[in-house]
Amino acid sequence: MKKKKAIKKMNKWGAEGKPFITIIDFDTKNIKVKALDKLPKSILFEINNKTNRERQQIDINILKSDRAEYYKSFDKVSTEISYGNTFLINLTTRTDINCDASLREIYNNSVAKYKLYYKDKFVVFSPETFVKIRKEESVGKIYSYPMKGTIDATIPGAKEKILEDPKEKAEHYTIVDLIRNDLSMVAKKVTVTKFRYLDLINSPQQKLYQVSSEITGELGEDYSSRLGDIIMKILPAGSISGAPKKKTIEIIKKSEVYKRGFYTGICGVFDGVNFDSFVMIRFIKKKGEKYFYHSGGGITFMSERDKEYDEMIQKIYVPTSE
């Protein structure tokens, strides 16, 4: 669906209070908007306990790839940073994986704040909110929770290390400022209400701390009739692009050796009053009989190639309740 048509449909269904789901790719060129009451069984989702999930327990085995392709992209990005064309860029790559499960089985087995299974083409188990829009005292409020900074939670003093690391601190300040500016395009009284708090994420392989912040703003009473305009105005998500956003997106497209497609796009559900959405990270794509795991992280002038690669590898996991 084209952008104008998608915006019009989201605005219309928002005004009518009609529940829907939207799935939007990184370039906002491939957009799905579907009514929840007509959602086919080939699309499964879970967003903060709103779900049409089927449950099943299975074992997951994920293998990792080598460093060569990532290093090529990292070197291109580092050059652009040295030229001053970007000062924070989210660099991603895809990794070939072996898995003893189908995408639907991965979906059923994983535990995450946000999940999506799409027509046996890809599965997402994301910890990262894009925006939430809630009706509060007759007006809309918008919330964003940018996530930047990851560390192995089993490292002694992990909490202190991630919060005190100069590179991680600078990266998080930058992304919070970027998201605050994005929200200011659609909302008033934009405020950072929580700054650099930690979430613990579990997987069979490891436990990770990730650093997030909360940013809020006020929308008008007519927010539901403008949902399409609001969402499209602030895409793509700042946490998976960088700053300055427009130039950084150009660099991403030149530096990465594949097209992201729906990876790092967003998925959102409107329940008739409130809208909740997430960034499509922690993403496994199926192509033919092959599986690819997409992951990445923020790069600044302080980034070290080996460390950034190791962080990217840390993010190749399927989260569970164990």
Image (cartoon, helix red, strand yellow):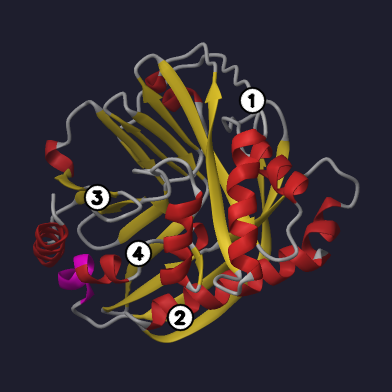
Choose top left, top right, bottom left or bottom right for residue 13. Answer: bottom left
Alpha carbon separation for disc pair 2 and 3: 24 Å
**Comparing labels 1 and 3, the label whose residue is closer to the camera:** 1
x and y percent of residue 50 in the render? 34, 44
Q: Main secondary structure of the magenta part?
A: helix
Q: Earlier in the sequence, mark 4 or mark 2?
A: 2
Give the residue type at disc 3.
Answer: Thr
- Please, is residue 55 above or below residue 16 in the view? above
Q: Residue furthest top?
A: 100
Circle 3: element type: strand
Would residue 115 be found to the left or right of residue 294 on screen? Answer: left
Crowd class of label 2 (few under 14; some 14 to 19; many from 20; radius 10 Å): some
Return the residue nearer the eye: 9 or 3.
3
- Magenta residues, as a range? 223-228
The residue to which callout 1 is attached is: 64
The residue to which callout 2 is attached is: 181
Q: Earlier in the sequence, mark 3 or mark 4?
A: 3
Circle 4: element type: loop
